[in-house]
Image (cartoon, grey):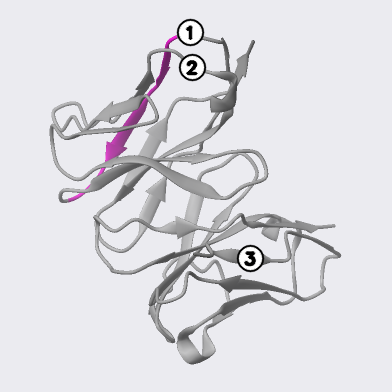
Amino acid sequence: EAGVTQFPSHSVIEKGQTVTLRCDPISGHDNLYWYRRVMGKEIKFLLHFVKESKQDESGMPNNRFLAERTGGTYSTLKVQPAELEDSGVYFCASSQGQGKGWEQFFGPGTRLTVL
Amino acid sequence: GDSVTQMEGPVTLSEEAFLTINCTYTATGYPSLFWYVQYPGEGLQLLLKATKADDKGSNKGFEATYRKETTSFHLEKGSVQVSDSAVYFCALNTGNQFYFGTGTSLTVIP
């Protein structure tokens, strides 16, 4: 069974440009999450989808970030325009169920560098 | 708010040494506690978990016990191997969202 996949694995862009990250969850997982790890710091929650609906987007840093999950399958996270502080590793995760006992399966991450 | 504090790295050990990575947490309610591991070039993988006080999670020789009285979930392994070199993240979940620590990088040398 394929795990969570993310594309691209690395992205280097200039400040002011736009970048779109993609996540394909494990098939059948309704719950999809985005996280971000800024250099050397903790991994922080960005948002949570249940199917195509945003369940919780309390971690989104500002309105330059837009996440979508059309059709409830893959998700995209767009940063427009990108700023220097957006650099970091963006992780996607998916799970079958919600709640504190459910394991979230993580993708390998997308390393974003904004110059 | 909910948070996790884990031991700063990096940690370098010789093969067969004993490993402890400290993790303490702050949470409202009764969280589940997790250790995730990230090997070079890969995503985070669940290493072990515990869902209630006094539970012990174990996997691949690693263990951690959910201690409510000390709000801790320290990771231990009796004899590390070179293949254990990775970044280890302690995390908690009180509902739908995970809270992670900063990660501890472990390097095991032969």
Q: Chain of mark 1?
A: B
Looking at the image, is A110 positioned above or below residue B30?
below
Which residue is disc 1 drawn over? Answer: B17
| SS majority, magenta | strand
Q: Position of residue A71 (x, y in %)?
A: 49, 91
Looking at the picture, do discs 3 and 2 lie on one chain? no
Q: Secondary structure at mark 3?
A: strand
Q: Does residue A65 appear in the picture of this structure?
A: no
Q: Residues within 10 Å of mark 2 (few under 14, many from 20)?
A: many
Q: Are marks 2 and 1 on the same chain?
A: yes
Q: Are marks 3 and 1 in contact (CB under 8 Å)?
A: no
How far apart in space, not on screen, are marks 2 and 1 (Cα)? 6 Å
Asked if one can make out residue B32 in the rendered structure from this viewpoint, the answer is yes
Residue visible at 30% across and 37% down?
A: B25
Query: Quick one: label 3, few (<14), some, or many (20+) residues within 10 Å?
Result: many
Q: Which residue is mark 3?
A: A6
Q: Position of residue A69 (x, y in %)?
A: 52, 84
Left or right: where A115 falls relative to A4: right
